[in-house]
């Protein structure tokens, strides 16, 4: 906890989440940018399918209101959230999360102290250089054998490109602050992970319907109806 804290959050994204929390309250997934509760539940199920609950503590980076890992609290696990936004930290605290106000690119934690890190729908708001720094910092604070589990929008899939265009237009007319949309491929994330001393344990694409949770990134429908990209990285 003695590392210098540098707050460098994007102001447009900050304003967007402030708007959502003020509108929806801290206890709803919509406060974290989810249009539908079922999409949040799908992402949560994907993360929990890979979390090793025997290897804590647990850290949600860019935690927002702290809802993603909240089920672990009922099992007595040590759960932390990290966010640069002061209002998000207050909301996560209300939801029972131990909150650290800090920067995902300069995590204010000592080396090798965390067992599992999750990060959900954050990378699309970050350019490649910041994404690489985030992965490096995550690897630094992970214990040996710890995992970094990431979900980010499949920005090139047909269904997401279409939805993003529609919602961007609606947001513009309603006066809501914009969301950035950076594209990150599995190849890019794997390259950053390798440099940081991590190996890929699993990768998949989540689906918004059809009753399936995840399919292979190489499956025919992945680039048509894929909702999010999902990867599990383990520190050596």
Image (cartoon, rainbow, N blue to C red):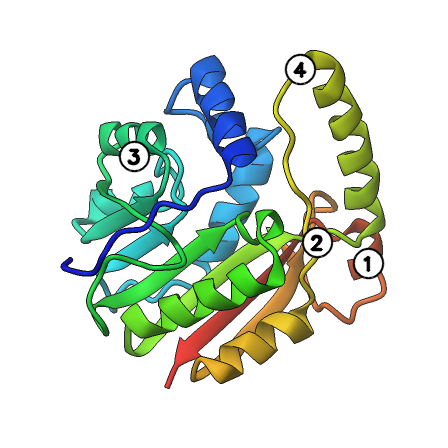
Mark 4, residue position:
175
Q: Which marked residue is nearer to the observer: mark 4 or mark 1?
A: 4
Q: Estimate the x, y position of residue 45 in percent, counting from the top left.
A: 49, 50
Decide: marks 3, 4 in contact (CB < 8 A)?
A: no
Residue count near mark 1 (Cα–Cα under 10 Å), binned few <14, some 14–19, many ≥20? some
132 sits left or right of 6 in the view: right
Residue closer to the observer: 100 or 9: 9
Task: Give the quadrant of the N terminus.
Answer: bottom left
Decide: marks 2, 1 in contact (CB < 8 A)?
A: yes
Q: Estimate the x, y position of residue 187 in percent, counting from the top left.
A: 67, 75
Mark 3 vs mark 2, CA separation in Å: 27 Å
Decide: marks 2, 4 in contact (CB < 8 A)?
A: no
Mark 2, residue position:
154
Task: Give the quadrant of the C terminus.
Answer: bottom left
210 sits left or right of 150 in the view: right
Disc tally is 4
What is the secondary structure assignment of the residue under circle 4? loop
Q: Estimate the x, y position of residue 69 in percent, counting from the top left.
A: 34, 46
Mark 2 vs mark 1, CA separation in Å: 8 Å
Q: Which of marks 2 and 1 is nearer the N terminus?
A: 2
Q: Residue at x 79, y 24 (%)?
A: 169
What is the secondary structure assignment of the residue under circle 3? helix
Q: Which marked residue is nearer to the observer: mark 2 or mark 4?
A: 4
Mark 3 vs mark 4, CA separation in Å: 25 Å
Mark 1, residue position:
223
Mark 3, residue position:
89
Q: Looking at the image, is 122 positioned above or below residue 57?
A: above
Q: Residue at x 74, y 46 (%)?
A: 210
58 sits left or right of 157 in the view: left
């Amino acid at each position: 906890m003695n590392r210098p804290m540098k707050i460098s959050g994007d102001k447009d994204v900050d304003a967007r989440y402030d708007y959502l929390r003020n509108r929806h309250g801290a206890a709803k997934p919509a406060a974290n940018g989810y249009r539908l509760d079922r999409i949040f539940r799908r992402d949560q199920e994907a993360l929990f399918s890979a979390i090793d609950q025997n290897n804590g503590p647990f850290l949600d980076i860019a935690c927002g209101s702290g809802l993603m890992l909240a089920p672990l609290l009922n099992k007595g696990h040590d759960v932390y959230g990290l966010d640069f936004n002061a209002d998000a930290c207050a909301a996560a605290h209300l939801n029972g999360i131990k909150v650290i106000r800090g920067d995902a690119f300069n995590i204010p934690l000592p080396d090798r102290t965390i067992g599992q890190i999750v990060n959900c729908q954050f990378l699309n708001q970050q350019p490649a250089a910041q994404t690489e720094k985030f992965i490096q910092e995550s690897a630094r604070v992970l214990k040996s054998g710890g995992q970094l589990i990431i979900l980010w929008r499949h920005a090139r899939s047909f269904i997401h490109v279409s939805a993003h265009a529609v919602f961007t237009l609606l947001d513009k007319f309603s006066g809501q602050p914009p969301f950035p949309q950076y594209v990150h491929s599995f190849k890019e994330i794997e390259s950053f992970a390798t440099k940081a001393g991590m190996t890929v344990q699993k990768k998949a694409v989540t689906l918004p319907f059809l009753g399936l949770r995840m399919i292979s990134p190489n499956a025919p429908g992945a680039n048509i109806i894929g909702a999010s990209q999902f990867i599990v990285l383990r520190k050596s």
